[in-house]
Image (cartoon, rainbow, N blue to C red):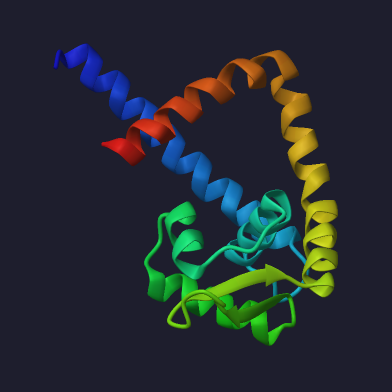
């Protein structure tokens, strides 16, 4: 790798890591009380999937360990945001579904973070954001495969 390309890669990843940390901090401040970003992520995925998922599928989707996902799911179940049941076909597995309270909590969280996200898109410009998304998606996919 050339020195120039190495500098470019370093600048890209430095900006991504700093942006990630800043976005996480800003989102955490506006999420409803006691909701963590990981909780919102799981609830949001369950709403988008419109189906039950296993804890292993959720762990895979978020690139976390099963133990970390179990911890998140236990908190969500305790809050009444998800229902966890045995898999009828394989009793060793469990299935996770969002509850009506979970859907309402996700909607409240989305309403709380939407102004922040909308403002960011507005300031950056919709066209720039549209061009950036495919690059970030490709980078994410490369990191998953890599």
Res 76 → quadrant: bottom right
Residue 118 location (% of width, % of height): 79, 35
The percent position of residue 75, horizontal first and vertical second, equals 61, 81
Q: Is residue 111 left or right of residue 5?
A: right
> Which of the 4 quarters of the picture holds residue 2?
top left
Residue 120, position in %: x, y?
72, 33
In the foreground, 23 or 84: 84
Q: Residue at x 57, y 63 (%)?
A: 53
The mark total stands at 0
The C terminus, quarter of image:
top left
Q: Is residue 24 left or right of residue 63?
A: right
Q: Residue at x 51, y 61 (%)?
A: 58
Above or below residue 88? Residue 43 is above
Residue at the spot 48% in from the left edge and 70% down from the top edge = 69
Q: Nearer the viewer, residue 55 or 6?
A: 55
Q: With 9 as the anchor, is 127 left or right in this view?
A: right
Above or below, 136 against 69 in this view is above
123 or 85: nearer the viewer: 85
Residue 74 in the image, given as x and y percentages of width and height: 57, 82
Residue placed furthest toward the front: 89
Residue at image point 77% right, 43% down: 116
Query: From the image, which quarter does the N terminus lie in?
Result: top left
Comparing 17 with 46, the one in front is 46
């Amino acid at each position: 790798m050339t020195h120039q390309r190495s500098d470019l890669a370093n600048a890209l990843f430095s900006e991504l890591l700093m942006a990630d940390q800043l976005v996480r901090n800003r989102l955490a401040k506006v999420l409803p009380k006691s909701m963590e970003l990981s909780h919102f992520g799981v609830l949001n995925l369950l709403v988008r999937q419109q189906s039950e998922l296993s804890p292993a599928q959720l762990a895979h989707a978020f690139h976390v360990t099963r133990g970390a996902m179990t911890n998140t799911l236990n908190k969500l179940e305790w809050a009444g945001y998800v229902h966890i049941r045995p898999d009828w076909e394989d009793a060793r597995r469990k299935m996770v579904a969002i509850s009506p309270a979970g859907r309402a909590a996700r909607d409240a969280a989305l309403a709380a973070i939407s102004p922040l996200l909308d403002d960011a898109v507005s300031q950056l410009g919709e066209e720039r954001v549209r061009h950036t998304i495919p690059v970030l998606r490709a980078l994410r996919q490369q990191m998953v495969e890599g």
